[in-house]
Every structure is written in structure tokens, then in C-alpha cells.
Image (spheres, coloured by chain):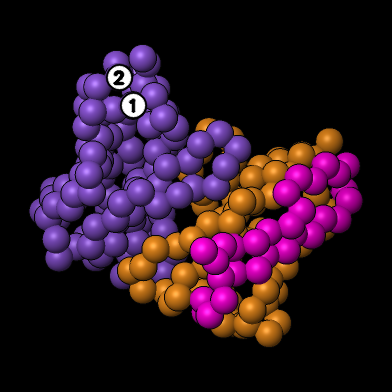
Amino acid sequence: EAEVAQSPRYKITEKSQAVAFWCDPISGHATLYWYRQILGQGPELLVQFQDESVVDDSQLPKDRFSAERLKGVDSTLKIQPAELGDSAMYLCASSPDPGPYEQYFGPGTRLTVT
Amino acid sequence: GENVEQHPSTLSVQEGDSAVIKCTYSDSASNYFPWYKQELGKRPQLIIDIRSNVGEKKDQRIAVTLNKTAKHFSLHITETQPEDSAVYFCAAKGNSGYALNFGKGTSLLVTP
């Protein structure tokens, strides 16, 4: 069964450093989401792509976060500089299209900022 | 934007009993309501979903009901087992946006 891939699984970094996360969605899925999940809370959307285009980045802290999906397949989420409050699980999800369909989640990247 | 509230935040039941988790949403245009189960350190996994043209859906021990008028939906787990212990999230997907809006989660503990 196809799955969403993410790397790294765990990342520890010092504040003010740069970090990057990678996501490879299920083959053929046009819609890709990046969520942030703080411990004890539900996932919150950071950015959504339809193919290579951003369709919603209203909750992305654009002064320090950036995301791209250049060829409409895999995607990278970057934080620069990292802050202590960025410690969280970063989840990538994909779906065939943006309609009312299941979103398949990757295993996530656990980020700890020290 | 869509606001999803979920109750209770924690739920403890004896094995074999039923568990009910309730969610409300604010956007009357929402049309898709999935439930995810997340075990510690693992990814959220879809366990059941319902669309706005259906009032109830069942899959073995799990059922979801939707009341569009009252804007609430519920997850029902019957004959609970210890392996049902996890955090459960409800979510709603509005027409005006594409992403899921999640509730804050319910930590379910099923004791033998």
C-alpha cells in the first residue's frame, strides 16, 4: 500500500539555526498539505499545495517559514531561523484532489528546538 | 473560518463498554467529517468518515452520526478493546477552504 514519506523522522536543532523537512506524497496525489501538531493538540494547517501552486498559506509564519513544491510532486518545508516555540510534530498529508476525500498522513518529523 | 470543538478531552471506559466522542462545527457549508485515530508517536489514521449527504455510517464496531441542523457529529465505539486506546481527532472540511480543521482530540483509555 502506498504511503506518504517524510524525512527526517526526528530533528534536534538549536534556536536560530535553519531546518528543512521533506515530503513525498502518494504517487498521483495532486494536493499536498503541511500541518503542525503541538503536543496534546490537533494538527493545524500551515500550507496547502495544488500541484505546484500554493492555495492556502494564511497560517504560515512567512517571516521564518517557507514551503515549495517545484515540480508538483515532493515538497520541502523550511524554517529559518528556528525558535523554541517551533518544537512540534510536522505532518505532511496528501489527497487525490482538494475535494471531500481522505487525507493520508505521513509519519511526521518531530522537531525539537533547544 | 471553521471552528471545531471536541468533547470530552479524556475518556476512560472499561473493556466491553461503549465510548462516545462528540464534536461541533461552525461552518454550515462543511461537507466532509473524518475521524482519525492517533497512537503515541504515530501518524493519524483515518478510521471512519461521513459526508454531509448521509446521517449515519457504520463500520463494524465504529459508527459516526451527523446532525447537520445542529452542526454536530459523534463517534461511537462499541465493545471497546484495550487496543482502542489512543487519541481520537474529529475534523471538518468546509466548502470555502480545502484543508481539514481538527478538534483538539480525545484521549481514550480502555482498561481491561
Q: Count neighbours of disc 1 (C-alpha within 10 A) and say few if under 14, some if 14 to 19, many if 20 or more.
A: some
Q: Are marks 1 and 2 on the same chain?
A: yes
Left or right: A12 as drawn, with respect to B24: right
Residue B89 at x, y = what percent?
Answer: 40, 43
Left or right: A102 as drawn, with respect to A34: left
Question: Which chain has been coloured purple in this picture?
Answer: B
Left or right: B67 as drawn, with respect to B16: left
Q: Where is residue B76, by image quadrant?
A: top left
Identity of the residue drawn at 64% across and 79% down: A73
Residue B14 at x, y = what percent?
Answer: 29, 16
Number of the label disc, if any, that sits on residue A58:
none
Say which residue label 2 marks. B15
Q: Is residue B49 above or below residue B97?
A: above
Query: Can residue A22 be found in the magenta stretch?
Result: yes
Q: Count numbered badges in the picture.
A: 2
Identity of the residue drawn at 60% across and 38% down: B41
Q: Is residue A26 above or below residue A109?
A: below
Magenta residues, as a range? A1-30
Q: Is residue A98 above or below residue B28?
A: below
Say which residue label 1 marks. B81
Q: Colour of chain A?
A: orange
Q: Count neighbours of disc 2 (C-alpha within 10 A) and say few if under 14, some if 14 to 19, many if 20 or more.
A: some
**Amino acid type of disc 2?**
Glu
**Amino acid type of disc 1?**
Gln
